[in-house]
Image (spheres, rainbow, N blue to C red):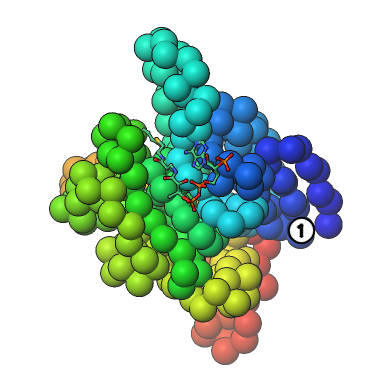
Amino acid sequence: MTTAESPLLLVDRADAVATLTLNRPAQFNALSEELLDELQRSLDALAADDDLRCVVLAAAGRAFCAGHDLKQMRARPDQEYYEQLFARCGRVMQSLVAFPVPVIAKVHGMATAAGCQLVASCDLAIAADSAKFAVSGINVGLFCSTPAVALTRSMPIKKAFEMLVTGRFIGSAEAVENGLINQAVPDGQLDAAVAALVQTICAKSPVAVRTGKAMYQRQRGMALDQAYEYAGGIMACNMMAADAAEGIDAFIEKRPPMWTGR
Ligand SMILES: C/C=C/C(=O)SCCNC(=O)CCNC(=O)[C@H](O)C(C)(C)COP(=O)(O)OP(=O)(O)OC[C@H]1O[C@@H](n2cnc3c(N)ncnc32)[C@H](O)[C@@H]1OP(=O)(O)O
């Protein structure tokens, strides 16, 4: 296991799994520009790692993430600065969506505004039962336009708008019901639940998971006919992969598959 630490983001690599931990606990992991830059740097570096199978996005302290850093933003009333800041944040969120292997949000405490955007931008999310989610910018005079982009791609549109326009907190059960997260687990079981999901994904063919993550995200923006054409091509490539031949042979021969990742 190797651990490289920065004050704002902890990057822990164990076997084929990387865990990124937001580490501004005293500020409820508010997304300062420096933290966004750290996230971007780490995601870019990890994206080039062909041995990686899964990423977990976690947080230190009492909260997952309280959104953009309101104090830092208020200190620089400059439209150009804000445009660059939100573009930077948008790049981080897009890097999560485009990341070559699944990214799992591990949520405890509060996830608000851009914190919800982070959760919605991950491929999968598991939260502690006591976690709470709100798009609370509206309480400070902000309609969370950039989080809306991620939320409307993760949740039913009326529910997302309700969250955006009311700032109301929802609990983990309501977040599961509305597709913001996959699973809510008792607080003491969050580590184990995330580890079990990681283990399940790592037990699958790496080539199927990587190909699948990329196609799943890409086809979402396509028209139906285009999506089927694209998916058919990807499926045909997948069928030609050594792992698919091995997986199907293993099924027929009633034995566990031995993946080679090709
Ligand atoms: C497109 C725009 C998107 C956006 O993301 S805009 C940002 C929107 N975010 C918010 O509106 C959330 C702001 N935060 C809160 O409303 C509350 O916090 C919570 C409900 C999340 C938690 O409340 P409680 O449990 O009472 O904690 P606490 O004392 O308010 O916060 C703990 C420390 O964390 C700092 N903090 C919390 N959120 C932010 C933030 N978003 N930016 C900067 N600092 C934040 C506080 O100030 C405080 O620190 P100190 O003890 O030094 O006062």
**Residue pictured at 63% horizontal, 54% vertical:** 61
**Residue pictured at 75% horizontal, 52% vertical:** 13
**Residue pictured at 45% horizontal, 22% vertical:** 74
Q: How many marks?
A: 1
Quarter of the view holding residue 32: top right
Q: Position of residue 200 (x, y in %)?
A: 58, 72
Where is the C terminus found, in terms of image quarters? bottom right
How many C-alpha atoms fall within 10 Å of the one at disc 1: few (<14), some, or many (≥20)? few
Q: Name the residue that disc number 1 marks.
A: 14
Quarter of the view holding residue 194: bottom right
- Mark 1: which secondary structure? strand
Q: Residue furthest left?
A: 158
Of 74 and 209, which appears nearest the observer? Answer: 74
Task: Answer whether residue 103 is visible to the viewer in this image.
Answer: no
Of 201 and 238, which appears nearest the observer? Answer: 201
On the rendered structure, is 183 left or right of 261?
A: left
Q: Residue furthest right?
A: 2
**Residue pictured at 74% horizontal, 51% vertical:** 12
Seen in the picture, residue 211 relative to 29 is either above or below; the reply is: below
Amino acid, disc 1:
Ala
Q: Residue furthest bottom?
A: 254
Q: Position of residue 96 (x, y in %)?
A: 50, 43
On the rendered structure, is 233 left or right of 54?
A: left
Q: Position of residue 116 (x, y in %)?
A: 40, 49
Q: Position of residue 49 (x, y in %)?
A: 69, 43
Seen in the picture, residue 27 relative to 111 is either above or below; the reply is: above
